[in-house]
Every structure is written in structure tokens, then in C-alpha cells.
């Protein structure tokens, strides 16, 4: 799925979602703004600096600089157990 070109449409799409799992920083910031539960997949960045402290926002940081190294099982466990 590609992201809408219109920022308002993207915000509406995210606001209507139950959860957002993303590597896209713009989408992550919009999810924070509209308070959608978000799992941000980060490329070694410090999640505490990227997302506000809240039960609604979880950052998973790769131990390498490659977000693809975050195991799908880790994402699923985060999704099901918070």
C-alpha cells in the first residue's frame, strides 16, 4: 500500500486505524498526533527520543542499523502483549 500524497488523507487514514506498524517517521508522527496505537520500527535510533512516553506508542529499535533485523516475532509479541 502506498501512502496518500495528501497529508490530511494520511492523517485520516491513520486516525481510523486501530494500530499502525511503520518505519515511516512522518506516519509515526501523525499517529502520535491522532493518538493511534503505534509500533515504530526504528533503525537503531533511540525509541525514547523518537516517541513520547505512553502505552500507546512503542518503539522497537534494531540492534544493527537495519530495521529488517527486527524479528517479526518481536513485533507480534509487542502487538499482543504491549
Image: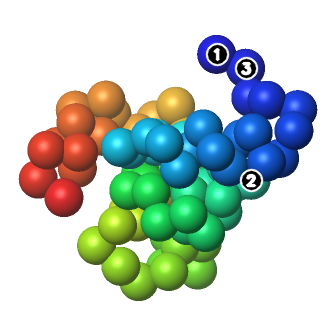
Instruction: Please indicate whether residue 18 sits to the left or right of residue 7 in the image.
Output: left
Please state, as top left, top right, bottom left or bottom right, where the C terminus lies in the image: bottom left
Tell me if label 3 and label 1 are in contact, CB under 8 Å.
yes
To which residue does mark 3 refer?
A: 2
Residue that sits furthest to the right in the current view: 5
Q: Residue 29, located in which quarter of the rendered image?
A: bottom right
The residue to which callout 1 is attached is: 1
The quadrant holding residue 57 is bottom left
- The residue that appears at 56% across and 57% down in the rendered structure is 31
Q: Residues within 10 Å of mark 1 (few under 14, many from 20)?
A: few
Closer to the camera in the image, 44 or 26: 26
**Helix, strand or loop under label 2:** helix
Which percent across, then down, holds residue 73? 22, 32
Query: Residue at the location (61% across, 69% down)?
Result: 33
* Percent position of residue 75, x then y: 30, 40
Instruction: Tell me the quarter of the image containing the N terminus.
Output: top right
Eyeballing the image, is 54 above or below 32? below
Q: Secondary structure at mark 3?
A: loop
Question: Relative to 46, does residue 16 appear above or below in the rendering?
Answer: above
Q: Which disc, if any, is residue 26?
A: 2
Amino acid at each position: 500500500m502506498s501512502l496518500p500524497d495528501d497529508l490530511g488523507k494520511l492523517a485520516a487514514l491513520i486516525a481510523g486505524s486501530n494500530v499502525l506498524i511503520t518505519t515511516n517517521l512522518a506516519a509515526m508522527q501523525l499517529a502520535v498526533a491522532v493518538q493511534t496505537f503505534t509500533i515504530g520500527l526504528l533503525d537503531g535510533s533511540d525509541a525514547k527520543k523518537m516517541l513520547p512516553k505512553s502505552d500507546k506508542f512503542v518503539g522497537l529499535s534494531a540492534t544493527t542499523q537495519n530495521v529488517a533485523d527486527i524479528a517479526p516475532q518481536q513485533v507480534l509479541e509487542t502487538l499482543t502483549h504491549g
